[in-house]
Structure formats: C-alpha cells, structure tokens
Image (tube, rainbow, N blue to C red):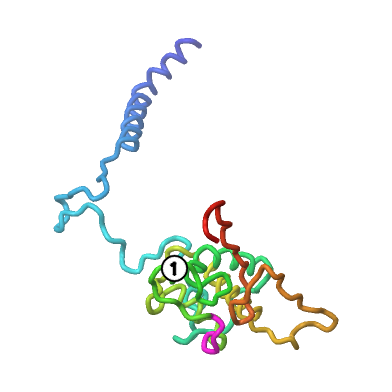
Amino acid sequence: MHSRAARKLRKFLPPLLVLIAITAGCRIDMHIQPYYRPFAKSDFFADDRSARMPVEGTVARGDLREDTYFYTGKVNGTPGDYMPFPVTAEVLERGRERFNITCTPCHGRVGDGNGFIPTRGFRQPPSFHIDRLRKAPIGYFFDVDTNGYGVMPDYAAQVAPRDRWCIAAYIRALQLSQNAPASDVPAGQKVPSPPPQFRDIGNGATLPEIAPPAAAEGEPK
C-alpha cells in the first residue's frame, strides 16, 4: 500500500512542481508590475508623456448627469422655475448653512448685499430683494452659483450641485421673509417687533446693534 502511494506521488510530483513554479512566477508579476510614476517621461508615446488622456466620451463613475435640469438649472437654455426635488425643512436648513458659509461674505446674512467683502473695496453685489431678482426664476440662482456672473466667480468646485439648489431655495425663503406683506401673516398671529438692540437696515431686515467699546478711564468720551 505504501509503495503504491509513493508511485502515485512520484508520478504527479513533477507536474505539481512545475505548476507551483508557474504560479509563483505569476504572483511575482502581479506584485511587482512595471508602471510609470505620475508625469514621468515615456519613450513609448510620441509626446513623451506616460499619462494619457481618457478615451473621448469617458464618464466618471457616478457622474453621468442624465438629469440635465438638476445640473444646469435650465430648460432649453432658459432658467427653470422649479426645484428638482421637494423643499423640506432639512433642505432649507442645509441651504441656510451653506449660504452663511459661502455667500454671506459678499451678500450679507439677509441677502441685502451688505456683506463684509464689499467694505474692503470689492464691488457690492445687488440685493436679492430688488424687483428683478425677486422675479427671477429659482434656476437663475442655481445657474449663477454654478457659472458665476459679472465679478462673481463660479462656485461649482466649492459647492456640490444639490447644495447649490439648497442655497437657491434658501435665497427664495429669504426673499419671502424680508418682503412678506402683513396679509401673509396667518389670522390671530402677530409679528413681533425687533428688540431695541436691533437696528433696521432696510427691506424689513434687521441686524444686531453693536455698542461702541467703553472708553478707558481718563480717555475722552
């Protein structure tokens, strides 16, 4: 019995060793592959560049952009006047957060154009509360945020498409809040007046009143 097993082993051992050797060689090739470092020179291509452009028409995974309106805000080249997804409290809260981060330096907290940047010599943006912008379709604000307008640069790289829509929705909410007539207030409810420490800055908007610093003892007041 023992000799029979030994004969079988001697019969299959050479092919087995060859298979192991071949497999080991493939493993080395898989682990140690020839490659070019980024921007390295290559003599194989006519332009001497190892990095190649993607095939024409290549689309990055997850970036097919089949919903044209979601990514452009336009219908047949004209800004649309509807949101591509439902406006919820979460959407407006996200829009408020993104607006306060990326937009208020120029446009101000209430969208009146009185941000910090214009006080340092940059052109003051128009208020969102002028008639032209109050009547502008919501897709217009998405388009401007995406492509820029006038001296305003585009924010496509800084703000994701959905967040740009959230900002547009929040701008519309700002416009409604700062220009709502008394007739829009539900019956039985009263709009409280701003506390005395707030000041009117126009268009119904208010900002905190900042008291000047107290003079030190001995200094003129």
Residue at left offset 15%, top offset 58%: 47
Query: Farthest top residue?
Result: 2
Give the answer, above or below, for where 174 lies relative to 21.
below
Horizontal side of 122 relative to 142 (left or right) equals: left
Query: Farthest right residue?
Result: 188
Residue at left offset 63%, top offset 73%: 199
Q: How many marks?
A: 1
Question: Can you give x and y, in whole percent of width and height, for residue 220 in the image?
Answer: 52, 59
Q: Which residues are magenta?
A: 128-133
Question: Can you give x and y, in whole percent of width and height, for residue 3 in the image?
Answer: 45, 11
Q: Residues within 10 Å of mark 1 (few under 14, many from 20)?
A: some
Give the answer, above or below, for where 80 lies relative to 165.
below
Considering depth in this image, is 162 or 76 the residue closer to the camera? 162
Q: Secondary structure at mark 1?
A: helix
Give the answer, above or below, for where 136 lies relative to 19.
below
Q: Residue at label 1? A: 117
Give the answer, above or below, for where 92 lies relative to 1.
below
Q: Amino acid at mark 1?
A: Ile
Considering depth in this image, is 16 or 168 the residue closer to the camera? 168
Horizontal side of 50 relative to 208 (left or right) equals: left
Question: Can you give x and y, in whole percent of width and height, for residue 117 in the image?
Answer: 44, 68
Instruction: Indicate the quadrant containing the C terminus: top left, top right, bottom left or bottom right.
Output: bottom right
Q: Quadrant of residue 45?
A: bottom left
Considering depth in this image, is 15 or 221 the residue closer to the camera? 221
Residue at left offset 57%, top offset 62%: 212
